Amino acid sequence: MSELPVVNRKRTFNWPLFLSPFISRLGDALYIFGLNWFIVKATGTASLLGIVQGIGGIVLVVADLLAGPLVDGMNRKMVMFWSDVLSFIACLLMALIVDVNHPVFYQLVLLTVILDIGLGFNFPAAKALVPELIETSALQRFNALSNTSINLADIFAPLLGGALLAIKWVNFREFLFINAASFLLSIALVLGISYRYQPERRQRLSIWSSLTSGFKYVLGKSLLVQMVVVDSVVNIFYAAFNLLLPYDVKHYFNGDEHLYSYLMAVMAIGGMLGGLSLIRSQKVRTMNQIEHEIYLLAAVMLIAGVWRPYLVLLVVTGIYGFLISRIGVSLYTLVQDQTEVAYLGRVFGIWFISVDFMHPVGNFIFGFIIDWLGEGTFILMGVTLAMAIFVISWLFSRRQSES
């Protein structure tokens, strides 16, 4: 008599799975805050910071590429656990050896690379674990609350960082110890996740074979391809929007850093509200509904380009954060709904490659366009985004009708 497979008990909510990414994100955001401040303070230039974060970004894309096969071929809970352990050890060792007055380049690069590797493996594993532990009817609500907590971490980290900077004896070392502590807490939470790994009985594929099968799986599902393409396009314009805000404040609002900080806070609050707006929804939202909100996103950009008072920009930025959050939550839930559990890690790995790769693409392209068009870039962004989504929707509708 064959042994029946053990099925993980699904619930409507899972506190450890909810809190672990939040704690890790809070520690990472605080680390980036401290890294930005203390490196520029110690060197007097932003070039070193740019190189460190640029190298980290490249490593993150590579980690996204390799994360999918690993997440699908191993215990997803243990992937989260070991990525947190690696990040904890790296932060702790760096805190013990760092020279806060004269930071060593290779040490900063090594730490940032390790943290980005940890992030590249942890996030897909956490997202892939959600459908295994959360009931289908509660997926949208859980993703909405999880996304809201991430926005809350982004709001709270600068506030906490600013408070720490007000304490004279606090330096970069303390920021590293705090980040290490956040990973230690995340480790405890991961261990608290009730999950039983069900290894597949078939022969384990190599990383290359697993990755290839993941791409074939995505390419075989038209809706998944459409979602990846749409999210990639949205992320180009998301990066451009974040690039345009400081430019606007610098050139049109007297370079007042307080006005810029208000914009970033309002965007984060809008993102939090956007996530909360979906917590009562039990149905997975359709691609058509998501596209309608992207059109609204394009309209918001047009408004920012036509009416230029700061109050309008403030309101527009809040609405932008609200819509971006709703679009992100809806896409995550739709991916989880449309993907077989065995392929979730690879699909999210491919997904995050597009996200992490398109940010620098958007920064590079619009960095030149913004210098040329100035605030008129808002209008170009709105028109181009709407046209891009219309063309993508038309192409995939035609493809589905022909198949």
Image (cartoon, grey):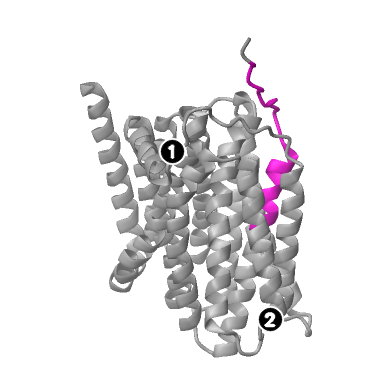
Residue at horizontal 65 percent and vertical 23 percent from the top? 7
In the image, the segment drawn in magenta is 3-25
| Quadrant of the image occupied by residue 35 | bottom right
Residue placed farthest to the front in the image?
1
Residue 277 in view, yes or no = no
Residue at horizontal 35 percent and vertical 30 percent from the top? 221
Q: Nearer the viewer, residue 50 or 247?
A: 50
In the rendering, at what x and y percent does residue 94 appear? 66, 75
- Residue 7 covered by magenta stretch: yes
Q: Nearer the viewer, residue 113 or 31?
A: 113
- Residue 55 covered by magenta stretch: no
Answer few, some or many: residues within 10 Å of disc 1's Cα (few below 14, many 20 plus, some between 14 and 19): few
Q: Which quadrant does the C terminus fall into?
A: top left
| Quadrant of the image occupied by residue 167 | bottom right
Residue at horizontal 61 percent and vertical 89 percent from the top? 102
Amino acid type, mark 1: Leu
Q: Nearer the viewer, residue 331 or 87?
A: 87
**Mark 2, secondary structure of its residue:** helix
- Dot 2 corresponds to which residue? 97
- Give left or right: position of 368 versus 243: left
Q: Is residue 183 above or below residue 368?
A: above
Q: Nearer the viewer, residue 156 or 219?
A: 219
Q: Is residue 93 above or below residue 289?
A: below
Residue at horizontal 40 percent and vertical 36 percent from the top? 292
Number of residue marks: 2
Answer few, some or many: residues within 10 Å of disc 2's Cα (few below 14, many 20 plus, some between 14 and 19): few
Amino acid type, mark 2: Ile
- Which tag is nearer the camera, tag 2 or tag 1? 1
Which mark, by number, is residue 205?
1
Residue 105 in view, yes or no = yes
In the rendering, at what x and y percent does residue 21 appear? 65, 50
